[in-house]
């Protein structure tokens, strides 16, 4: 079943057309990868889906409900969570407190359920040993995990991950991949993932959508994408 | 009360507009290059006004000659602020992300509020709070049914010259080009080899100096007091917001727009509406300011 | 937040405050009354300026609206109705303007609140003029002791509200959105609603304080009631005391009142200059204020 449907979405900033008639669909329980060079419009698409920005035209539906232009807090409570490419932790709070905000407001958790959700999210993101550390004291890798933990705490059905592997060492990438795979396996969360680490994206995704200059230039299985001439030309810079 | 279509009102509006233009130009320079909302801007004008006043009263020096002195004093103040404050704390931190930047800017504002209060009260302590004035170029020239006092005509002329000079520099000189580049995107400017730090200091000093000059010009025709700065600050803010933050030419046009609204607004109602008009436009401009105007000016990434 | 370290000293101060009138002379009672006033104002301000991070430099507008309401209702209704009416009026005003005003961020919010306070001041002046009331006289002012108890109650209420909000969902949401508004919204915090709640809550008690304080002088002075210096003092007290901490209001108000006791009679300008210097100093070097110092010492052990 289609969980998320993006139809003909366009977004212009000043003179720049960030997204041009972009459409894609995400099936429940799947992992969809989103690839493209910097400036291709991937993060903009996330912002539109999560409600941080409004599309100029087009529709976005989640579980058959139109969510185009809804406020982020509403979309979050409907079941979509996102992480930010440039991490945005609540710096004056600890890891646990950060995650608690997600749980409390994202899914209205209270009392023992609140504690439970926090514990689970922190563990899943691999932050159990640092739960009471101030968010400001974490390394980049830690803060990226915090983004994931906090997003998880909101109890999403769809998780938008924006370059969670950027800046991580290969070992950290492996670790994160494990975590993401288990998210899908154990919690049944649908993932829409932006990644530059191509190997990770290919391994993780059931299908991939390639963006270039705000337009969808290809979509299909990782194998198909790898062979697609348009993708090879624009993204991999190869002549076919 | 002057007839609404009289040349008298037009003259008043032009004079007021030219003063706003000079003041706002200074504020815009500082904001454009440093992203600083200098709330003490009007108090710098007050400094310039008192400089002109004392030079005239004590030394018999014509304000036309003391304007450079006023400019110099304010430029010195800028240098002191830069050396003492801008290299520390929230003002020195560099942030390019919208929200963090805005919080830093809010804290920086507090510093300038503090400066404003200090300036006002130091002046009040030194000069007492009572308003003062001096008489200069008192003669009245009659032209086409409009009486123009010499000092207002002089102020208009000098302000116009400054405006034209500013336009010329912006358009034709490399300095002007560098300033425009810095306002557009400090990061990009640095990358192409503009010594951003030096230009910033220069812009700060020029901006403060312009405030001082505006104050000197105001002192020629208006009463001055240690607390005269605030309305000048507000007017300058209105002008730069309406004209577009960092848009130096837009600010010049907006200066005259505001002056016309004020002069004709008061003529249509009464002088007790002057402040209501001023702050009303101020609040309105801030509320209706399209966010896009700011987004384009503030460099991000 | 260490609960004992916060609440215990506050309880001690409250205890002192209750015992205070039994031994205080008439002059000292006035000082105590003023201290309660400033604590009430600053603690209320902290809801919006500290917890939410929206620094209002125009908080006197709520004080003034409360005072004006009380003034209009004077001798029409008893005091114990007029005072809450003042708070209600201020709260309603905040609710009314909150939505558009809170959409403005960072430093623009700061100067916008300043502009709004001035605008309301001039509007009230205008309306008084149009109504033909050049001056209103107040007869039958409540005793200083009555005022003291009322203000002590308001100060206590303000601090209690601050303590409670910090523990609730609202408080946590506010701190989150203060740190990062976009991230907070993305994880489900109803940002606009919470900001409005903080803004409105922060207006009510100042409204009631204003409703009381307006009765202290024999005649009604709009300029004094809406004096921007009040806003400035509130912000300075909050920053010096510590805007993250309920103890901050007490510390900041206490310190500044102490200083003013020594300086005000002699030279009000020196007091204000000192405020400006302190504000700048604390923003640059001690952003968490005196309360921040206390917490740090506690944590070190």
Image (cartoon, rainbow, N blue to C red):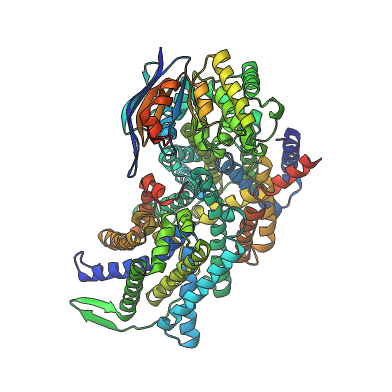
Q: Is residue C104 left or right of residue A119?
A: left
Say if A64 sits above or below B175 in the image.
Answer: above
Q: Is residue B54 above or below residue C152?
A: below
Judge from the rendering whether residue A40 lies leftward or rightward of residue A125; answer left or right.
Answer: left
- Residue situated furthest front in the rendering: A240
In this view, B137 is above or below B242: below
Q: Is residue A68 visible?
A: no
- Left or right of B297, for residue B260: left
Taking the image as shown, residue B22 lies to the left or right of residue A117, namely left
| Number of residue marks | 0
- Residue B177 location, x and y as percent? 39, 64
User: Residue A127 location, x and y as percent?
Assistant: 66, 27
**Residue under the point 53% across and 68% down:** B78
**Residue A232, how many percent across, how many down?**
40, 31
> Residue A58 lies in what quarter of the image?
top left
Q: Nearer the viewer, residue A202 or B180?
A: A202
Residue at image location 44% in from the left, 78% down from the top: B67
Q: Quadrant of the N terminus of chain A?
A: top left
């Amino acid at each position: 079943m289609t969980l998320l449907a993006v139809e003909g979405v366009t977004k212009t900033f000043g003179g720049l057309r960030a997204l041009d008639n972009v459409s894609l669909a995400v099936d429940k329980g799947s992992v969809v990868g989103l690839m493209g060079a910097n400036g291709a419009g991937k993060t903009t698409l996330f912002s539109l889906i999560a409600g941080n920005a409004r599309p100029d035209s087009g529709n976005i539906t989640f579980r058959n409900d139109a969510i185009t232009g809804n406020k982020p807090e509403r979309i979050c409570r409907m079941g979509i969570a996102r992480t930010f490419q440039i991490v945005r932790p609540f710096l004056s709070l600890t890891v646990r407190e950060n995650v608690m905000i997600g749980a409390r407001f994202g899914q209205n958790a209270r009392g023992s359920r609140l504690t439970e959700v926090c514990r689970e999210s922190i563990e899943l993101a691999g932050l159990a040993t640092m739960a009471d550390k101030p968010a400001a004291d974490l390394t980049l890798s830690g803060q990226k995990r915090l983004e994931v933990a906090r997003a998880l705490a909101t109890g999403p059905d769809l998780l938008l991950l924006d370059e969670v592997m950027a800046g991580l060492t290969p070992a950290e990438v492996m670790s994160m991949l494990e975590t993401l795979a288990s998210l899908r396996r154990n919690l049944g969360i649908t993932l829409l993932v932006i990644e530059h680490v191509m190997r990770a994206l290919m391994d993780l995704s059931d299908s991939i959508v390639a963006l270039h200059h705000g337009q969808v230039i290809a979509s299909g299985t990782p194998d198909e994408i790898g062979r697609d001439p348009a993708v090879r030309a624009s993204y991999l810079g190869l002549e076919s | 009360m002057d007839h609404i279509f009289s040349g008298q009102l037009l003259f008043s509006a032009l004079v007021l507009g030219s003063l706003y233009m000079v003041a706002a130009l200074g504020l815009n320079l500082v904001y454009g290059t440093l992203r600083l909302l200098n709330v003490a801007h009007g108090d710098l004008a007050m400094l310039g006004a008192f400089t002109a006043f004392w030079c005239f009263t004590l030394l018999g020096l014509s304000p036309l000659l003391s304007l450079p002195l006023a400019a110099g004093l304010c430029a010195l103040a800028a240098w002191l602020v830069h050396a003492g404050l801008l290299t520390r704390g929230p003002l020195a931190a560099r942030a390019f992300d919208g929200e963090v930047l805005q919080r830093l800017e809010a804290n920086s504002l507090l510093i300038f509020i503090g400066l404003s209060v200090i300036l006002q009260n130091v002046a009040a302590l030194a000069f007492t709070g009572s308003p003062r004035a001096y008489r200069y170029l008192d003669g009245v020239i009659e032209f086409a049914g409009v009486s123009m006092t010499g000092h207002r005509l002089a102020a208009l002329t000098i302000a116009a010259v400054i405006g034209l000079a500013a336009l010329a520099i912006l358009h034709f000189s490399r300095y002007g080009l560098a300033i425009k580049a810095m306002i557009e995107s400090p990061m990009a400017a640095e990358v192409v080899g503009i010594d951003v730090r030096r230009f910033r200091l220069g812009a700060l000093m020029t901006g403060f100096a312009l405030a001082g000059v505006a104050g000197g010009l105001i002192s020629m025709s208006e009463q001055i007091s240690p607390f005269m700065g605030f309305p000048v600050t507000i007017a300058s803010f209105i002008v730069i917001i309406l004209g577009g933050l960092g848009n130096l030419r837009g600010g010049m046009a907006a200066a005259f727009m505001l002056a016309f609204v004020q002069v004709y607004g008061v003529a249509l109602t009464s002088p007790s509406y002057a402040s209501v008009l001023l702050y009303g436009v101020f609040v309105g401009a801030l509320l209706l300011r399209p966010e896009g105007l700011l987004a384009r000016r503030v460099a991000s990434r | 937040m260490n609960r004992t370290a916060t609440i215990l000293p506050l309880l001690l101060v409250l205890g002192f405050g209750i015992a205070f009138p039994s031994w205080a002379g008439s002059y000292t009672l006035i000082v105590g009354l003023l201290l309660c006033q400033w604590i009430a104002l600053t603690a209320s301000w902290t809801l919006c300026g500290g917890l939410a991070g929206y620094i209002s430099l125009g908080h006197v507008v709520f004080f003034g609206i409360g005072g004006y309401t009380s003034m209009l209702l004077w001798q029409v209704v008893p005091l114990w109705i007029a005072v809450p009416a003042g708070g209600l009026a201020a709260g309603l005003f905040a609710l009314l303007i909150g939505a558009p005003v809170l959409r403005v961020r960072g430093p623009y919010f700061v100067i916008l609140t300043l502009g709004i306070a001035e605008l309301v001041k001039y509007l009230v002046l205008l309306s008084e003029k149009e109504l033909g009331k050049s001056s209103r006289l107040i007869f039958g002012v409540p005793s200083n002791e009555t005022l003291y108890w009322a203000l002590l109650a308001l100060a206590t209420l303000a601090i209690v509200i601050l303590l409670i909000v910090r523990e609730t969902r609202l408080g946590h949401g506010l701190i989150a959105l203060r740190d990062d508004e976009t991230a907070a919204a993305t994880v489900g915090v109803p940002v606009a609603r919470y900001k409005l709640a903080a803004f409105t809550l922060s207006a009510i008690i100042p409204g009631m304080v204003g409703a009381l304080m307006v009765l202290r002088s024999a005649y009604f002075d709009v300029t004094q009631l809406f004096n921007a210096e009040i806003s400035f003092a509130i912000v300075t007290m909050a920053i010096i005391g510590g805007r993250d901490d309920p103890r901050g209001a007490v510390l900041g108000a206490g310190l500044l009142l102490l200083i003013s006791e020594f300086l005000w009679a002699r030279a009000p300008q020196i007091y204000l200059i000192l405020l400006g210097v302190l504000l700048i100093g604390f923003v640059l070097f001690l952003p968490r204020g005196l309360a921040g110092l206390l917490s740090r010492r506690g944590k070190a052990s």
